[in-house]
């Protein structure tokens, strides 16, 4: 009798749950001010603008950290990355930092009966520490809930410059095995440092190691020549893989994590975008991302999936202009403000580090509009568990169910949010607190602000979105309260 009841409850929970397809369109280093729907007058992103016009555009949506690896770690696991050692920016030969079997955003969907796929940039490590790139590359995405994967291991500026499909490098010739090292160069292989005459794009800082397709990278590699990617074709490759995944999963439901590489360095868009933005390769790469979005949305339209698909668009961290290559991003910036009115960007504790474009479209359920709710990607595991009628994963300790805010049925998102820039800072409502933090206020290589400062910083974002007036001296009680709230959040997950 009891088991009948349980069965009945399970059936009704499943029936009560909505199971839209979910497509997560994730840009790399795209800033709050980089899209015309977020106010840019210097760049036109018509496909993303249409998505925003048909959906809910968030003005206070965040990634969890101001760089890639910790941000993606938090988004997939539902745990702030600062709680775990080894979750900073990873080299391309790092072992996987999400333990196999751990519940993730992907496994939440898989458990709900979804087809799950990741296409694009991974940057969470692969293998268990003794990886042979010529053999089975595992553990990887398939061991944490994805059933299909077509990825690059780390970033476009890190070796190995090849794609990995499921457990294998794509197009690898066994007669030309691949070797990867982050320690020393391979004798006889060209590097950016030794062979600058072979470069089509020169580094501005770092990036002077393995020389692949006329661009020098971080780390060294040898062999695997037939498998090397062409930077100019990378966006089209990922996009066509995404279209294929949607086509084969169309009977649904499916979850696609489309992790684009644009506009991360090296910015080498396809020739059809070159010169089109007037802002140099960085702007052109943003047009390329918009184009990928357009192609994926057109696929949903073509297959009649628009109504039944929740599309989420966001970025893994804020923008950076010079991130290590002489690509004219600084010289051609003109009036463009990649972080909009926000201060800081990638690597920064200021809002520009983690406040990013954040759009939800689900025609069947979400009313178009604009929301000022405080929402964060770390909340995806709990929120999508709720959407699919499941409890939040126990290990997703920082993930809150903010589904009503994501769907626009409630204007309240989070009350508090920890932001991981350089220094770890705290939002409570519109108040922003950055604790005193040693270290340079400016990153000399990227010429960007870190948020470090000798004393505490307090900003009232409701009056001062650009964090220009430090109120710490005049509001000492609030500083004290926020300092202890931050300490508590650091020590006690769930805040
Ligand atoms: C930095 C790289 C930068 C970029 C970043 C990771 C240098 C000098 N800079 O170390 O170019 O690759 O790491 O970016 O090497 S992220 O978006 O993946 O976090
Ligand atoms: Ca990034």
Image (tube, grey):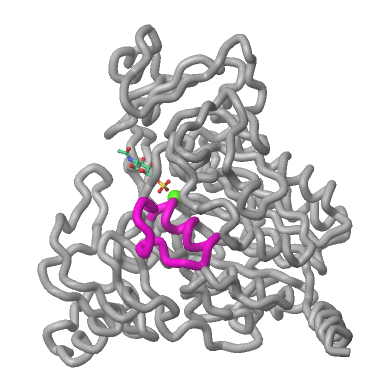
Identify which residue is drawn at 13% across, 89% down.
474
Can residue 277 be seen from the camera position used here?
no
Residue at image position (27%, 34%) is 205
The range drawn in magenta is 67-87
- The quarter of the picture where the C terminus appears is bottom left
Q: Which of 194 and 384 is in front in this view?
A: 384
Task: Report which quarter residue 389 is drawn in.
Answer: bottom right
Q: Percent position (x, y) of residue 240?
A: 73, 39
Q: Which residue lies furthest to the bottom in this view?
A: 477
Point out the residue furthest to the top here.
Answer: 188
**Residue 313 drawn above or below residue 227:** below
The image position of residue 398, as x and y in percent, is 47, 73
Using residue 268 as the reference point, say whether residue 255 is left or right of it.
Answer: right
Q: In which quarter of the image is the N terminus?
A: bottom right
Q: Where is residue 44 in the image (x, y as percent from the top left)?
A: 56, 54
Report ligand 1 position as a quadrant. Answer: top left
* Front residue of 252 and 335: 252
Q: Can residue 318 be seen in this view?
A: yes
Dominant secondary-structure state across the stretch colored magenta: helix
User: Can you say whether 391 is above or below 96 in the image?
Assistant: below
Q: Is residue 210 left or right of residue 244?
A: left
Q: Does 307 appear in magenta? A: no
Give the vertical position of 243 relative to 355 (above or below). Answer: above
Q: In which quarter of the image is residue 112?
A: bottom right
479 vs 84, left or right, is left
Q: Which residue is drawn at 60% across and 43% down?
A: 120
- Residue 444, x across and y down, in percent: 19, 46
């Amino acid at each position: 009798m009891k088991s009948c009841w349980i069965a009945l409850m399970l059936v009704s929970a499943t029936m009560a749950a909505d199971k839209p397809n979910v497509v997560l369109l994730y840009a790399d280093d795209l800033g709050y001010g980089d899209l015309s729907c977020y106010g840019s007058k210097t760049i036109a992103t018509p496909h993303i603008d249409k998505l925003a016009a048909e959906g809910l555009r968030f003005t206070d949506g965040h990634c969890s950290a101001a760089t890639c690896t910790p941000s993606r770690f938090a988004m997939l696991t539902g745990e702030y990355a600062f709680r775990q050692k080894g979750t900073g920016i990873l080299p391309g030969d790092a072992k996987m930092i999400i333990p196999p079997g751990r519940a993730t955003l992907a496994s939440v969907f898989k458990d709900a009966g979804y087809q799950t796929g990741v296409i694009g940039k991974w940057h969470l490590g692969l293998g268990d520490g003794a990886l042979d790139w010529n053999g089975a590359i595992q553990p990887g995405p398939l061991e944490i809930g994805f059933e299909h994967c077509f990825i690059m291991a780390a970033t476009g500026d890190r070796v190995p410059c090849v794609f990995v499909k499921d457990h294998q490098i794509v197009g690898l010739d066994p007669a030309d095995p691949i070797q990867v090292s982050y320690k020393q160069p391979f004798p006889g292989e060209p590097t950016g440092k030794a062979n600058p005459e072979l470069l089509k794009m020169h580094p501005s800082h770092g990036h002077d190691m393995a020389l692949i397709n006329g661009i020098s990278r971080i780390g060294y590699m040898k062999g695997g020549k037939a498998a090397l990617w062409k930077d100019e074709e990378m966006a089209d490759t990922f996009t066509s893989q995404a279209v294929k995944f949607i086509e084969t999963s169309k009977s649904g439901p499916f979850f696609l994590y489309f992790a684009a590489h644009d506009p991360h360095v090296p910015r080498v868009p396809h020739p059809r975008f070159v010169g089109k933005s007037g802002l140099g390769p960085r702007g052109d790469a943003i047009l390329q991302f918009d184009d990928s979005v357009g192609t994926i949305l057109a696929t949903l339209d073509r297959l009649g999936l628009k109504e039944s698909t929740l599309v989420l668009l966001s970025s893994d961290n804020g923008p950076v202009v010079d991130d290590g290559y002489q690509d004219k991003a600084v010289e051609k910036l003109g009036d463009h403000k990649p972080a909009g009115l926000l201060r800081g960007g990638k690597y920064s504790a200021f809002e520009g580090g983690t406040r990013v474009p954040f759009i939800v479209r689900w025609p069947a359920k979400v009313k178009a509009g604009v929301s000022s709710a405080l929402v964060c990607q770390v909340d995806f595991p709990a929120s999508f568990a709720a959407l699919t009628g499941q409890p939040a994963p126990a290990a997703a300790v920082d993930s809150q169910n903010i589904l009503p805010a994501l769907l626009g049925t409630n204007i309240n998102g989070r009350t508090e949010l920890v932001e991981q820039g350089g220094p770890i800072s705290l939002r409570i409502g519109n108040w922003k607190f950055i604790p005193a933090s040693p270290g340079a206020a400016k990153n000399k290589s990227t010429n960007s602000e870190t948020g470090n400062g000798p004393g505490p910083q307090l900003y009232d974002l409701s009056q001062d979105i650009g964090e220009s007036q430090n109120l710490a001296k005049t509001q000492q009680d609030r500083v004290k309260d926020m300092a202890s709230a931050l300490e508590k959040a650091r020590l006690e997950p769930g805040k």
